[in-house]
Amino acid sequence: MSGGTQAYRGGPISTEPRINERIRVNEVRLVGPNGEQVGIVAIGDALRLAQEADLDLVEVAPMARPPVCKLMDYGKFKYETAQKARESRKNQVNTVIKEMKLRPKIDPHDYETKKGHVVRFLKQGDKVKITIMFRGREQSRPELGYRLLQRLAADVEELGFVESSPKQDGRNMIMVLGPHKKKSEARVDVEAEKAKKLAEHEAEQEAERQERAAQLKQYEAEQAAGATKKPKGPADNLDPE
């Protein structure tokens, strides 16, 4: 082509390996279906072995000399690879940073409420950014915020650790708590806790059903006993003397 350049025509370059008759070499280093080394064989022999085993000949290392090929069920291999990739994407979680704001002179009730939120976030595997907001004269007492952050960190130390130590940022003081457990691990724990509560709830319901059934059985037995008891007549009330 004029100008010393060549134009590329065609579709995108395939990233899938070459299989079976698409493998255009004279010989290959063959690997069996269970990973056993067969050795260097002619491409015709490799294709024949694949056909006899009802498998595919898949080029797994095209840059090797000779290329490495493996006998496998390529359709099953692609399916399992896609399943693993999908599972990996499902388990992959992005780091989430929650934020909790407190005042230096927070009252005990509000502190417990805020701490409860922090505990919940850490259990879920999220980081928590704690912000102490100073107003007016409070800005001259940064030690109040520092002590409050230390107290909160100590209260939740079983669930999280201080990832970023308290530092002043304008009118605010900031500390970041990180969870001990990863997001994926925390998710497993949350699901396990849900399953445990569900099982306990179902057990309680079953116990209640059994108790009601026992009460009903006892009531029916008492009713049956009352119905078979002989009623008293006038003679039964007479004095035998």
Image (spheres, rainbow, N blue to C red):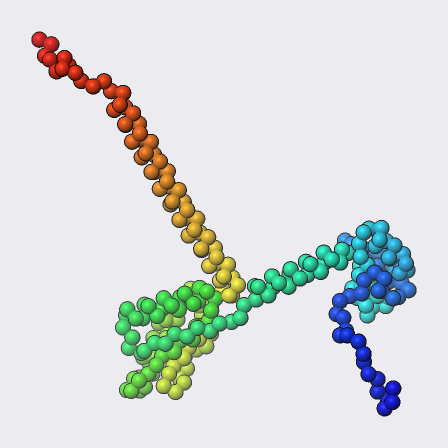
On the image, which quarter does residue 223 sit in? top left
Image coords of residue 12 (percent x, y): 75, 74
Placement of 185 over or under 198, stated as above or below:
below
Front residue of 151 and 74: 74
Q: What residue do we see at 41% from left, 75% from top?
A: 99
Front residue of 100 and 159: 100
Q: What residue do we see at 41% from left, 82% from top?
A: 167
Placement of 75 over or under 215, stated as above or below:
below
Image coords of residue 65 (percent x, y): 86, 68
Image coords of residue 7 (percent x, y): 82, 83
Residue furthest top as drawn:
241
Q: In this view, does 70 lie to the left or right of 232?
A: right
Residue furthest front as drawn:
234
User: Can see residue 131?
Assistant: yes
User: Can see residue 36?
Assistant: no
On the image, which quarter does residue 87 sit in? bottom right
What is the total number of numbered labels drawn onto the structure image? 0
Q: What residue do we see at 41% from left, 65% from top?
A: 120
Front residue of 49 and 167: 49
Quadrant where the C terminus sits is: top left
Image coords of residue 67 (percent x, y): 84, 66
Q: What residue do we see at 42% from left, 52% from top?
A: 197
Q: In this view, does 236 lie to the left or right of 51?
A: left
Front residue of 226 and 90: 226
On the image, which quarter does residue 107 sit in? bottom left
